Amino acid sequence: MQHLTLEALARLVDEAPTPQESVHVRDCILCRRELEAMRGDLAELREMDDSDPPLTAWADLEARLVDEGLVRGRAPAAAAPFAHPWLRAAAVAAVFVLGGAAGAALWSARAGTTVAAADGGAMLPGASAALPTRTVESGPSTPPLLVMEEPAPVAASAGARLAANGEARPAPAPRRAAPPTPAISGAARELARAEAEYLAALQRYAELADPASGADPQSRLAALDRLVEVTRSALDRAPGDAAINGYHLAAVRERDALRRQVERARAEENWF
Amino acid sequence: MEDNELVQKARLGDAGAVRALYQRHARRVFAVVRRLAGDDTLAEDWAQEAWVRAIRALPTFRGDSQFTTWLHRIAVNSALHGRRSRERKAGRETVMDDNLATRSPGDQTVLRLRLQKAMDQLPEGMRRVLVLHDVEGYTHEEIGEMLGINPGTCKSQLFKARGKMRLLLSPAPALEGVETCNT
């Protein structure tokens, strides 16, 4: 008997099979597997997350609404540079330390485990058996982040001081502990460095993206290129990490949107 | 502040109220437009068009339905009737970083990106039906009305779209090249 066509299988995703089709699907592992795969595709499609428009979308829309007389004046500027959901979520402390695979291993409730800070000082990671944490819903398009209630113990770098809700907070005093094992301290140092680089790049981009800054598109593009580079580098350290994957993809998307905007503006200038 | 209160203010040209509505619903609007457009550049244009149409039409919003439902319909219509004034760019360097696809194949983020990329590659008619039915949850009758086709044609397009998606998502589908089975 011939296999069922893909269209026939697609119909069976949400319609009842004929008696012959029912027997075939029951007995044919290939058709049954394809049908199950299609049902899986449908389930994923139904759960697809919403996506963020480019950061510049509101500014462009507002300008048009003002031109057309649909609004009076401009809306008050966003108070914080991290107004965009993914920027705000990504600025939370320990985004790499807890999100990264290496970081997760470090925090796996090993009492007395030490973490080497970016500056080489040794610190305890807090109450390793019961770290005070909370889950931050960073938005539908990014997975929830597990955030420490206290600033990250590796917060020795300037970039990491931007931790916790986008506000500058002083780094906690390091507590002396036994020297860390080389493997753990090396991984922690790398992750801490990646986190600091990421937060610094993010802060730089957020400053330039603020309409009040007056920054030109090329400067913003350069800042986004840096963000993409840093997140890609972080992925080398933690390739399976969903949070870092998400931030990298968001940065790539934002950069591509800005590139298109710059190209469009250039094309309009050179229309002749 | 509830949507209806913001709408009242936005009708009077209050930029802050319009911005608040935008911040609340921009992701939803962009998502549905992006899926229908199959292209980032078009999605940006059409999403902006959707918002402009919605703000223009605010005086006609009576509150019989939820603002989200009303706005969603405007976004869908904008995407379905959007003019392709810009050339679509194929093979752009964008979200599908190849390194990610090989690094974490089981990751939900990558899977959903693959779904989006596959949808982008569907012929426009198939993509519209798939997005409206399987992603956005419209019925065949509603889709038929939106697209000017009968529900039977809509179903047929949907089944073709699902089959094509399977081919795009699976480089070597189990049934390809295997004509018969033992049953």
Image: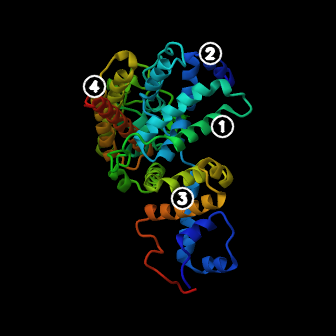
Q: Are marks 1 and 4 on the same chain?
A: no
Relative to residue A212, is residue B34 depicted above or below?
below
Q: Report in which chain the residue with disc 3 lies.
A: A
Disc 4 target residue: A219
Residue A164 showing in the rendered view: no
What's the amino acid at mark 1? Answer: Thr
Relative to residue A2, is residue B24 depicted above or below?
above
What's the amino acid at mark 2? Answer: Leu
Q: Report in which chain the residue with disc 2 lies.
A: B
Relative to residue A146, is residue B89 depicted above or below?
below
Residue at 64 percent across and 22 percent down: it is: B7
Q: Quadrant of residue B8?
A: top right
Q: Are marks 3 and 4 on the same chain?
A: yes
The residue carrying pointer 2 sits among few (fewer than 14), some (14 to 19) or many (20 or more) residues within 10 Å by Cα, namely some
Q: Secondary structure at mark 2?
A: loop
From the viewer's side, name the closer residue of A224 and A89. A224
Q: Report in which chain the residue with disc 4 lies.
A: A
What is the CA distance from the residue labelled 1 to the residue labelled 4? 39 Å
What is the CA distance from the residue labelled 3 to the residue labelled 4? 40 Å
Earlier-in-chain disc, 2 versus 1:
2
Q: Is the Cβ of the residue at disc 2 closer than 8 Å to that at disc 3?
A: no
What is the CA distance from the residue labelled 2 to the residue labelled 1? 22 Å
The disc placed on residue B12 is 2
What is the CA distance from the residue labelled 2 to the residue labelled 3? 45 Å
The residue carrying pointer 3 sits among few (fewer than 14), some (14 to 19) or many (20 or more) residues within 10 Å by Cα, namely many
Disc 3 target residue: A41
Q: Nearer the viewer, mark 2 or mark 3?
A: 2
